[in-house]
Image (cartoon, rainbow, N blue to C red):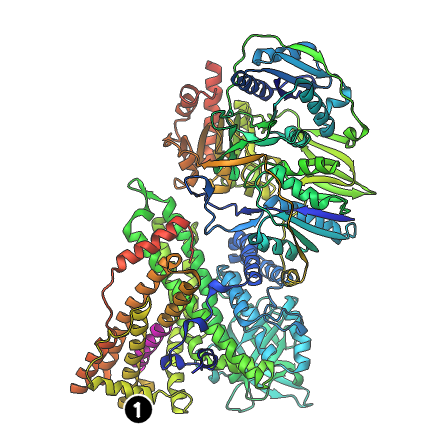
Amino acid sequence: MSVIVLVEHTGGIIKKKNFEAVQYASRIAENTGTTVTTLVLGTIAVSEMESLGEYGAQKVLHVADGRLDELHARAYASALFTAAQKENAKIIVTLHDINGRAVAPRVAVKLKAGLVAGALSYPDLENGFVIKKAVFSGKAFAFVNIVSDVKVIMLMANSFPVIKGDGKAVVEKLEVNFSDKDFGVKVKQVNKVTGEVLLSDADLVVSGGRGMKGPENWGLIENLAKELGAATACSRPVSDADWRPHHEHVGQTGGTIRPNLYIAVGISGAIQHLAGVNGSKNIVVINKDPEAPFFKAANYGVVGDAMEILPKLTEAVRKFKQQH
Amino acid sequence: MNATESVKAIKGGEFLIRETAAESVFIPEEWNEEQLMIAETCTNFLAQHVTPNLSRIDEQEAGLMPHLMNEAGELGLLGISVPEEYGGFGKDFKTSMLVAEKLGGGHSFSVAFSAHTGIGTLPILYYGNAAQKEKYIPKLASGEWKGAYCLTEPSSGSDANSGKARAKLSADGKYYLITGQKMWITNAGFADIFTVFAKIDDDENLSAFIVEKGFEGLTLNTEEHKMGIKGSSTRQVFFNDCKVPVENLLSERQNGFKIAVNILNIGRMKLGGGTVGACKEVITSSVGYANEREQFGRPISKYGAIRHKLAQQAILTYASESAVYRASQNMEEATELLLESGVDAAKAKLKGIEQFAIEAAIIKVHASEALDFVVDEGVQIYGGMGYSAEAPMDRAYRDSRINRIFEGTNEINRMLTVDMMLKRAMKGELDLMGPAQKVAGELVSIPDFGGTEEAGLFTKEKKYIANFKKAILMVAGAAVQKLMTQLSKEQEVLMNLADMLIELYVSESLQLRVEKLVNLKGEEACKEQLDIMRVYINDAAEMIAKAGKEALNTFAESDEKRMMLMGLKRFTKTEDINTTQCRRNIAAKLIAENKYCF
Amino acid sequence: MKILVCISQVPDTSTKIILKDNNTAFNSSGVTFVINPYDEWYALIRALELKESGIATDVHLITVGRADVEPIIRKGLALGGDEAIRIDADSNDPYETANYIAGYARGAGYDLILCGKESIDYNNGTTGAMLAELLDIDYIGFAADIQIEAGSAIVTREIEGGEEVDTVNLPAVISCQKGVAEARIPNMRGIMAARTRPLKVITPSALTPVTAILSYELPPAKAGIKLVSSDNMDELVELLHSEAKVF
């Protein structure tokens, strides 16, 4: 018996949110008296896999099939299913991200398992197997009890701090009998945005709204983001007006993000926008309208003209970074 | 007497002398799924296409308004009540009223929309011959052609039949040559079709003509600069021997004034729907702002002075709306009866509308004044921001004001309300004499202290309303007796009588609506609506008392006056209620829902 | 080509969430319900576009819910859906929902099943992939563009840090987001036609859900804001460093 975690990597590099998932799983394993086994797919160095031990993984099952370097959801699901059966796992953990959402539901069906998508808490074992998740796009939380024997948890990234420990996981090869169907989706083309911090991964986000007046002023947002090492985002009217690309839109009908710091510039804070960002740990609101509803959801506020404040803030950050 | 039959037969103006059963009125809480979907389409259209562009509309950006009209046309919103054979959707009057209401918050767009679908389309639809309808209506219903209506002239506004525009037959007998100047013509800048009123030769009455933009001799002046509805195209239209083919005479010679008046009747009622819609939008903004704006550490919606304003905005809106849809339904039923008796569709509709011209005038006045109140308090709730041209109240405040002026000024409509009532009595269509004499008799008898009837939820209010009717019959009866033919010259008295009639009609419509609603949903679910009704009728009693007293003091004398003043007091007496608490309850609901929610 | 579009009823995006029954239920009184925006704006409209361009022949809608969801089904029909199916059940468990839909779709000859990337009430975004697994077909999530060519779909979908163009043989399930299509407003013609379009109600054999929502909670109110003068950005940076510890 063990808790199985699907760990993803990008070109052989494992990103932080996967460590969070491993650490999350290891805590559950502790509480349920079992161990953590991670599943890693595709081409990756053994040392990179071994490092998962630093976050509590005892064992790594590695499916070293090069076809798995890109997402083939059915193949991933087959591998995870095989691993779960091999380990007799009752709990399966993935991230609640794009790939996780393509894979975990399939595994849940294969195992007839109940699933919680976007878990924000450890399971409460005293009242069953109860996990907190956001509903109504962050306007509320639900406590979901999984009643099936096997449980699938899709963890919302940035829910827990990641603490690096000691340890080295043992890497084992796993053979999976893939069928042609597992590779039915063919990837024709990949267009990666390079050189920017990814919004979904970002710890720090600078976001602009209609108060920025026009796309020509976005340089101010980008400068601050660059200085901070932050990703950029925007509100719906901004993406609707095509001032910014759609993938930057955060809010109820756009992306939901939970960064450590969210700086909202010229965004009034409509309920739909707040829904997408109110999981942020710290919110700074810059707005010239002191009545903007966003101020009520903010930790720090600056009332004034964004065009004047942004350069000053960027400069202050630059100064701070030089001193520290 | 069978209740439904009697209700079906209710005539225009009869509200003054008859009781109406609650189950017979239409209330907006009864919209069916299809109507709600149409309403949602209107709401989404406004939210997505109109509201984000209000500033561009007000700047009269070239081509924008016709483009928005085309989009509305593509959605089918320009042909809601046009028969299907002419490319419309054949929906009933209530549904077209619902559309007017849902688009009513669109500022200048609403004006363009209602001018096109009302005065721009209806004269041809109702009075055109088959060839005229086939030629013009499908294109107006789709929005391919836009319509306008040319009645007012620089020297003839309220006195519409006094216009100077003249038409004469051309030498070859193929054309009417129209010469004249028309003013305040809505949609003129982009209209393709104008319904133009002019007298042929030395006729006593106007005739109406369908004039296409391209007809020789038609020119447009530049855009007028207006206080509000700045995005609505308003121009003078000049006709200089404008060549109109004889087949474009609408209806018969000298029938134009009748056309003008009847089309205005519809316009007045529709204006009621539109302003109710605008009221709701403004209330939603007001509540939203009051919930956001903090002073002394609390949102201002927590303060009684603001709550009073919010509640009063909602009370007037809900009351006005009750009258709008009650009258719409009555008109429809009258039309149906006429249709059943074999009258053709267009005529039945006109007759139905004509019958409810009194109610149309009442609604026009009440709803436009309700909106003016609502926007005024909207500005006040916004405080300093209310006066800022960057906040929404600026436009709402300026755009509201025209509603008391166009479609007949509120003064003209007040006079018409009384005038039509009395004319119908004179013609024997409406028996005011009998009931008025009964009231006069009651004045000298021992007052009825009541109390025998079982007290129901609406017993008191029904009694008040019955008394309001007595008060009006008493004052109006005395006015007719005393002033006789002079009454039409005593405009102040006419205004008083009109105010009394307006308050009666709206109070009764509101009471019937709430009664029906309670029957549908139960008392618990209608607490705030009951409060709205109680406050409104309480205040109406005071207004009726005040107007009645003012009238009596104008023309009555000595003992008779004293007796009538006492009667008036008795007929407008209501039990004391805590209106402050009622308003607090109403406001609390608005504040919790953060929008207009009744 | 036959397309099945999965739609779900959700509270309007402007809804303020109020709880009732000791926080075990969401208070829906006075709430406006709409078609889940991703289902309507993108999945359904794309299906209708495919029909308008002659690629699809039939667009069917399916939803799981009681009779009170019929207004949103009618709206889907008013937008242009040819036929609708309502599975008469209550479900907020994605596994249960996917099973109901799969039960209907299995063997019904659909070439393409579209849904929104997630519903804005339970925010799972898992029903589509479950449905694909149950039907043993491929699934592509987060599509931003869908083209149909010779029995397969060419799908541009979101990946981390960019996008990817995939081809997939039909039948398949695709979940849609922004970019796939543009929202439309139902017109009068559609609204009037909606009444006459068939709406099938199917009573499913009951399933045992594998999850249950025990209770809800509202987010705590923020503990008050610190206002910083616009002339003192150094102070803001210092607060972010020493107090918020974000860098």
Residue B435 visible to the viewer: yes
Q: What secondary structure is the magenta-colored segment mainly?
A: helix
Badge 1: chain ID: B
Numbered marks: total: 1
Image-based side of A170 in relation to C216, left or right = right
Image-based side of B494 in relation to B445, left or right = right
Return the residue nearer the eye: B421 or B11.
B11
Return the residue nearer the eye: A276 or B206.
A276
Q: Residue at x 65, y 40 (%)?
A: C98
Image-based side of B111 in relation to A172, left or right = left
Percent x, y for residue C13? 52, 45
Residue on which the image places disc 1: B484
Image-based side of A201 in relation to A304, left or right = right
Percent x, y for residue B383? 34, 50
Magenta residues, as a range? Answer: B491-505
Secondary structure, mark 1, is helix
- Residue B504 is inside the magenta segment: yes
Residue B371 visible to the viewer: no
Return the residue nearer the eye: B578 or A221.
B578
Question: Image quarter for residue B44?
Answer: bottom right
Q: Residue at x 67, y 74 (%)?
A: B85
Q: In the image as oriented, which residue stretches furthest toward the left? A: B559
Question: Image quarter for residue B275?
Answer: bottom left
Residue A59, compared with residue B330, is above or below; it is above
Q: Residue at x 56, y 34 (%)?
A: C211
Return the residue nearer the eye: A180 or B236.
A180
What amino acid is labelled 1 in the image? Answer: Met
